[in-house]
Amino acid sequence: MEGSIDVAFVKEFYANLYVPRDKHQKQVRARGHLIKFDADSLNTFLETPIVLEPGETLPTYSKFCRLRPDPQELAA
């Protein structure tokens, strides 16, 4: 919505985002609330559940991200 961004809250979120002892942390505390932004939490918020085929352990996009595709193949 237009004008509904609380700039102070966004700054607090980013200020608390990095914790040196845990570089892989997927949550942050802002204004006393714990905000999780791992894949499951984001999919729940966006109402886009991960659908796995029988026998799969990762969604297709996650598998793609772990590959090292040939740049020429991607460009084609």
Image (cartoon, rainbow, N blue to C red):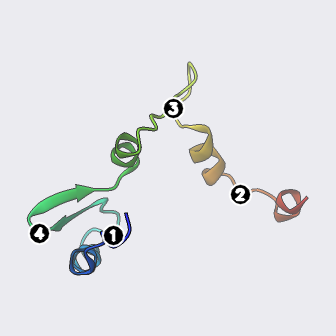
Q: Which mark's residue is nearer the viewer, 4 or 3? A: 4
Name the disc covering residue 68, or none. 2
Name the disc covering residue 23, or none. 1
Mark 1 → mark 3, Cα distance in angstroms: 24 Å
- Does the residue at mark 4 contact the one at mark 3 (Cβ under 8 Å)? no
Q: Amino acid at mark 1?
A: Lys
N-term mark: 3 or 2: 3
The residue where tag 3 is placed is 57
Q: Is residue 68 left or right of residue 41?
A: right
Mark 4 → mark 2, Cα distance in angstroms: 40 Å
Residue 15 sits above or below residue 51 on the image: below
**Among the 4 quarters of the image, the one containing residue 71:** bottom right
The residue where tag 4 is placed is 31
N-term mark: 1 or 3: 1
Q: Amino acid at mark 4?
A: Arg
- Does the residue at mark 4 contact the one at mark 1 (Cβ under 8 Å)? no
Foreground residue among 74 and 69: 74
